[in-house]
Image (cartoon, helix red, strand yellow):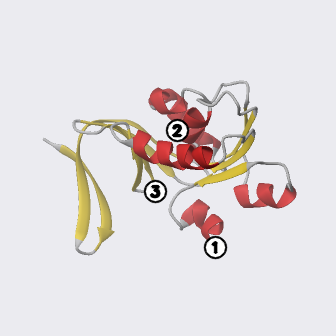
Amino acid sequence: MALWFTEQHTDDVRFSIHIKEQLYSGKSYYQQIEVFDSYEFGRVLVLDGYIMLTEKDEYIYHEMMVHVPMACNPSIQRVLVIGAGDGGTVRELCRYDSITQIDMVEIDEQVVKVCKEYLPQTACRLEDPRVHIYYEDGLKFVRRVEDTYDLIIVDSTDPFGPGEGLFT
């Protein structure tokens, strides 16, 4: 029997991935979290039924999120990352020795724990001494700070569910 994960885009569009096995399935306070091992894309992180990343191509997204703004201003030292529980954005930021502080604000601690266990290539730099993780609402956090960061990166889910406020 073949196992497939299917993400429904519209009534007329679906995206399916052939799955070897489901590695994790759990519900946090905020969302359903799943990790699959697939034949074509490696491990796949799914939140509330939507694909957040695959091992095969996550680097494209994370490199663009980080290296474009860093190329525009190489003197950036203090960075705030909102979301990014998978760790990929932090991994890319840690490539810069000039960065002295990376504060990551992720609402869902369970996502970080799952990614550390099942997606270590993405979450590999979350223990870097420059990284400080805050488990709280990113919108509330950013309203409390002023003139603290040289760069703010919002790496959140799609504009519904826990990430909705960051888009509006």
57 or 74, nearer to the observer: 74
Q: Is residue 106 left or right of residue 40?
A: right
Point out residue 121 in the picture as x, y percentages from the top left corner: 46, 28
Instruction: Please name which of the two marks, 3 or 1, marks the residue nearer to the observer.
Output: 1
Q: Quadrant of residue 85?
A: top right
> Disc 3 and disc 2: Cα gap in Å?
19 Å
Residue at the spot 86% in from the left edge and 54% down from the top edge: 147
Q: Quadrant of residue 94?
A: top right
Residue at the spot 54% in from the left edge and 43% down from the top edge: 67
151 or 49, nearer to the observer: 151
Point out residue 135 in the picture as x, y percentages from the top left corner: 72, 44
- Label 3 Cα crowd, 10 Å radius (few <14 / some 14-19 / many 20+): few
Mark 3 lies on residue: 48
Q: Is residue 126 left or right of residue 1?
A: right
| Dot 1 amino acid type | Thr
158 or 61, nearer to the observer: 61
Q: Quadrant of the C terminus?
A: bottom right
| Dot 3 amino acid type | Asp
Q: Earlier in the sequence, mark 3 or mark 1?
A: 3
Q: Is residue 151 left or right of residue 47?
A: right
Mark 1 lies on residue: 168
Q: Is residue 70 left or right of residue 54?
A: right
Q: Earlier in the sequence, mark 3 or mark 2?
A: 3
- The reply to whether residue 74 is in sight is yes
Q: Quadrant of residue 39?
A: top left
- The reply to whether residue 84 is in sight is no
Point out residue 139 in the picture as x, y percentages from the top left corner: 73, 61
- Label 2 Cα crowd, 10 Å radius (few <14 / some 14-19 / many 20+): many
CB-based contact (under 8 Å), mark 3 and mark 1? no
